[in-house]
Amino acid sequence: MQKKSPPSDVNFVPSCAAIIVAAGSGTRALAGDTSASITALTKQFWQLGTKTVLEHSLDYFTAHRLIAAVILVLPKCQISRINDLIMPTPTPVHLVVGGATRQESVRAGLNALEASVDTDSIAHVAIHDAARPLIPTNLLDRLLTALEVEKDDKTVGAIPVLSFADSIKTFDQNHTNKSKIIDSSLNRSKIAIAQTPQLFNLRAITSLHREFADQLGFTDDCSLAEKAGFNILAIDGAKQLMKLTDNDDYIMLEQWATRTNTTFLSANKAKTGNMTETRHGTGFDVHKFDHESGPIWLGGIKLDSDRRILAHSDGDVGLHALCDAIFGALADGDIGSHFPPSEPQWKNASSAVFLTFAIRRLAERGGALIHLDLTFICENPKIGPHRNAMRARISKICGLSIDRVSVKATTSEGLGFTGRGEGIAAQASVSITLPALPGMSTQPNQDGQG
Ligand code: MG
């Protein structure tokens, strides 16, 4: 059977929705931690690398080309707070108040999806627990591919699972003393840990959640399908998908979060050994000022300006130059080839979405960003007062520590279009590492020609 691959063309219509469940209070994880600043926050707001726990999942789904809409299920008390966290993206994010249990929260999410999104073109829904922040980049594609290959009426979902490396024991339930007594060993090849996101046929899982609304106690969505006798496919999960439940998890996840693109690097190392190559890319962009006043986007942040910028998207020359620098280092076209200005879907689009996409293209090749350097060329606005805010924002979007993010500015001494204040220019350079490719020459040219 020929395997289907998810579409790689950005022009196709996305056919999945995502429900992120973050409705639990989640305060037990660091209960023993003495840091009041951490324990005062529910775990979805803890900082993990350059983002909060919740932002990792939210950014994954809003930037994914398969996702048409995201439903974020939260406790009622966090609805107002979350508005500050959500970046403007072309993928709509709908907030909904969760229920008392996970199962009720997912049902609330499915109801909200039906009520707020045109679901005619949506075939699948990925249901994800926000407490698993580090989703491998290609996981959703792999789940969808598995489900599309195994097309039959009985198979309604696919989930990531992680097998056990340890021996698994059961306890003697009749033993009432304080210490536990081992009763037997389980065949570990027959059991695995269920992770999220779990991908389902939208209509099937919606129907199952309604059917079992009176039977609470299902701890994941796969369990409902099992109970109803449907088949669920299992694909390889990942250790980095671990659930954040205690201090030890937090320490491990933090280490993973600060190492970008871990999964891809290790996957590619298997093919290429430990050889890597370093590449550099450059990008340049210009946008023209309008005569009307209005806010402008520059270096990922919004600034007041006496003149708007003319552009199809939000017109952030800095992020556009950075995208082109990354595409250049990958020899992967340019921003116009990935996001054509002729396409209405990119009208007023946040350039953060473009940069997130460029970072994903890099991750899909097993690469990592090492450093970036962005220079604005303009008379106005003055960049200096906003430099650190821009660096912080770009650091967050790229998942790169701030000491590897440089933002500079210069003028053109009154000369040319930037000197006359007719527009803003930006140039960027990036350094990346990639796994060494088979075509990379390590031997001198045999014919002696350089
Ligand atoms: Mg541009």
Image (spheres, helix red, strand yellow):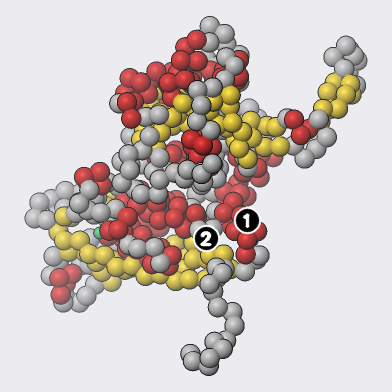
In the rendering, at what x and y percent does residue 206 appear? 45, 18
Residue bearing mark 1: 266
Q: Residue at x 47, y 45 (%)?
A: 5
Depth check, front residue: 174 or 275: 275
User: Height in image: 119 above or below 431?
Assistant: above
In the rendering, at what x and y percent does residue 261 appear? 55, 53
Residue lying at the far left of the rendered structure: 291
Whether residue 402 can be seen here:
no
Q: Is mark 2 within 8 Å of ligand 1?
A: no
Kindly report the distance in space between the C-alpha atoms of the residues bearing marks 1 and 2: 10 Å
The quarter holding residue 88 reads top left
Name the kind of residue labelled 2 in the image. Answer: Gly
As helix, strand or loop, the secondary structure at mark 1 comes to helix
The quarter holding residue 382 reads bottom left
Q: Residue at x 64, y 35 (%)?
A: 161
Left or right of 266? Residue 315 is left
Left or right of 336? Residue 328 is right
The image quadrant in which ligand 1 is located: bottom left
As helix, strand or loop, the secondary structure at mark 2 comes to loop
Residue lying at the far front of the rendered structure: 1
Name the kind of residue labelled 1 in the image. Answer: Ser
In the rendering, at what x and y percent does residue 289 appear? 14, 59
Q: Residue at x 43, y 21 (%)?
A: 203
Depth check, front residue: 138 or 356: 138
User: Height in image: 198 above or below 221?
Assistant: below
> How many numbered badges does the structure rendering display?
2
